[in-house]
Amino acid sequence: MISEQQGQMLLKMARISIAEKLGLSVDKSQIDLNQSFLEIKQGLFVTLHKNGALRGCIGVIEAVEPLKTGVAETARLAAFKDSRFAPLARDEFDQVDLEISLLSPPEKFEYSKAKELIQRLVPFKDGVIIKKGSSQATFLPQVWEQLPDTASFLSQLCTKAGLDADEWTKGSLTVHTYRVHLFCEKK
C-alpha cells in the first residue's frame, strides 16, 4: 500500500516530468528515486484537469514498468499525447491539477445477464474494463461521478470501446473490475 506522502511524491514526479517536456526549470530536490516503493510495478493512470474539466488521461491497466519510470512516462503521455486534446501548452501548466490512480489487479467479473451486471457493479468503487473481440475500454471509478446511473455508465463505456451502446445488455462482453488508490495534488 502506498502512503499519502508517497502518493504526493508520485504527483511531484509527474508534474516534474511534464515541466521538463515543456522546457521549464524544475526543482528535483524533494524527489528521492532510491525509495523501494518506486520499484513496484502497478497499473496506473495520470489524469489532468483544467478548471475542473478533463484535460488529459492516459494509463496502463497492467503494469510493465516500475512506478519510478511509469509515472513520468504516463504523465507525459496524458499531457501531450491524449488524442482528445491538443498537447498541453506552457501557459496551461500552472492551470492543471494532476491526479494519479494506482490500480489493483483486474479481476474477472462473472455474470450471465445484464440485470446481474447492473446489480453487482459497485458505483464509485469499481473501475470497469469491457472487452469484445478486439474492442476494449475502461472507465476509472472516478467516472461514476459524471455517470452515476449504471446503465448510462455501461452504455458510455461500450461507446468508448467502439461498440453499440446497448452491447452490455446482450451478455456478450468480458468484464473485469478493479479498484484504485487515488492521489490528488494538494494546492
Image (cartoon, grey):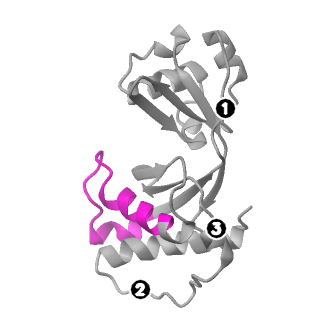
The quarter in which the N terminus is drawn is bottom right
Residues at circles 2 and 1 in contact by the CB criterion of under 8 Å: no
Does any portion of residue 160 appear in the rendered image? yes
Residues shaded magenta: 70-96
The mark nearer the N terminus, 3 or 2, is: 3
The mark nearer the N terminus, 3 or 1, is: 3
Element class at badge 1? loop
Residue indicated by mark 1: 123
**Residue at mark 2 to residue at mark 1: CA–CA distance:** 39 Å
64 or 129: nearer the viewer: 64
Q: Residue at x 53, y 75 (%)?
A: 12
Q: Return the residue found at the far bottom.
A: 29
Check if residue 157 falls in the magenta segment: no
Classify 89 as above or below 125: below
Residue indicated by mark 2: 26
Q: Looking at the magenta stretch, what is its main secondary structure?
A: helix
Q: Is 166 on the left-hand or right-hand side of 185?
A: left
Question: Residue 37 appears at what percent x and percent y?
Answer: 67, 71
Residues at circles 3 and 1 in contact by the CB criterion of under 8 Å: no
Classify 62 as above or below 50: above
Q: Residue at x 45, y 72 (%)?
A: 15
Element class at badge 3? helix
Would you identify the image quadrant in which residue 129 lies?
top right
**Residue at mark 3 to residue at mark 2: CA–CA distance:** 19 Å
**Disc 2 crowd, CA 10 A, few/some/many (<14, 14-19, 20+):** few
Element class at badge 2? loop
The quarter in which the C terminus is drawn is bottom right
Q: Is 84 on the left-hand or right-hand side of 36?
A: left
Amino acid beneath label 2: Val
